């Protein structure tokens, strides 16, 4: 049996697409996708997806070019929402992992201890010409590190 070793700094990556929530500016609804643009449930985000076995999950906003190549583009994309930060809480234990992550280039990388899961709030910045800037938090996806 051969195992595939991922290249350095490669990790399970999911794309998060903020969608309009019917005027509720207090919660940001999101849809999640794998790198092929296939929908993934918010409770199925796992470090071991896509053949990787490290302790990190990357959540990134797709570019317009990436979205154009997907077959399952969600309706009502909130184009004014930009990934700003994430806050994580390890569920069922404490592994001394950091809890706050600032987004860089519209992506966050979150560590997850072996055989554990973390609740995650994604924070989005909004700003447009018709209203002042504000922040919203996503509903709570779960990220896992389980084979």
Image: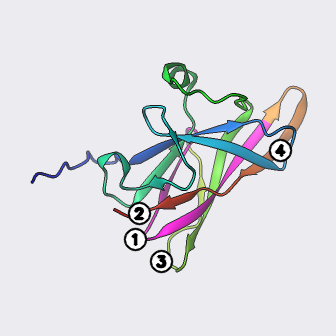
Determine the secondary structure under disc 4: strand
Mark 1 and mark 2 residues within 8 Å of each other at the beta carbon? yes
Judge from the rendering whether residue 80 lies leftward or rightward of residue 43; answer left or right: right
The residue carrying mark 4 is 134
**Color encoding of the figure:** rainbow
Q: Is residue 110 magenta?
A: yes
Q: Residue furthest left?
A: 1
The number of numbered discs placed on residues in the rendered structure image is 4
Q: CA distance from mark 3 to mark 1?
A: 11 Å
**Quadrant for the N terminus in the image:** bottom left
Precedes in sequence: disc 3 or disc 1: 3
Give, as a single range, the part of the protein colored magenta: 105-126
Query: Rounded to the nearest whole Å, what is the CA distance between mark 2 and mark 4?
Result: 32 Å
Q: Nearer the viewer, mark 3 or mark 2?
A: 2
Q: For residue 95, which numbered disc appears in the image? A: 3
Residue under circle 2? 145
Q: CA distance from mark 4 to mark 1?
A: 36 Å
Tell me where residue 91 sits by quadrant: bottom right
């Amino acid at each position: 049996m051969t195992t595939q070793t991922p290249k350095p700094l490669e990790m399970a990556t999911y794309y998060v697409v903020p969608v309009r929530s019917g005027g509720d500016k207090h919660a940001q609804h999101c849809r999640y996708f794998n790198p092929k643009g296939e929908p993934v449930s918010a409770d199925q985000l796992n470090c071991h997806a896509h053949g990787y076995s490290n302790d990190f999950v990357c959540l990134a906003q797709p570019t317009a070019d990436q979205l154009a190549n997907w077959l399952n583009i969600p309706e009502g994309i909130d184009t004014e929402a930009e990934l700003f930060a994430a806050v994580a809480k390890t569920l069922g234990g404490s592994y001394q992992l950091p809890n706050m992550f600032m987004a860089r280039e519209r992506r966050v990388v979150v560590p997850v201890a072996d055989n554990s899961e973390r609740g995650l709030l994604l924070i989005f910045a909004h700003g447009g010409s018709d209203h002042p800037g504000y922040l919203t938090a996503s509903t709570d996806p779960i990220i896992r590190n389980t084979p």
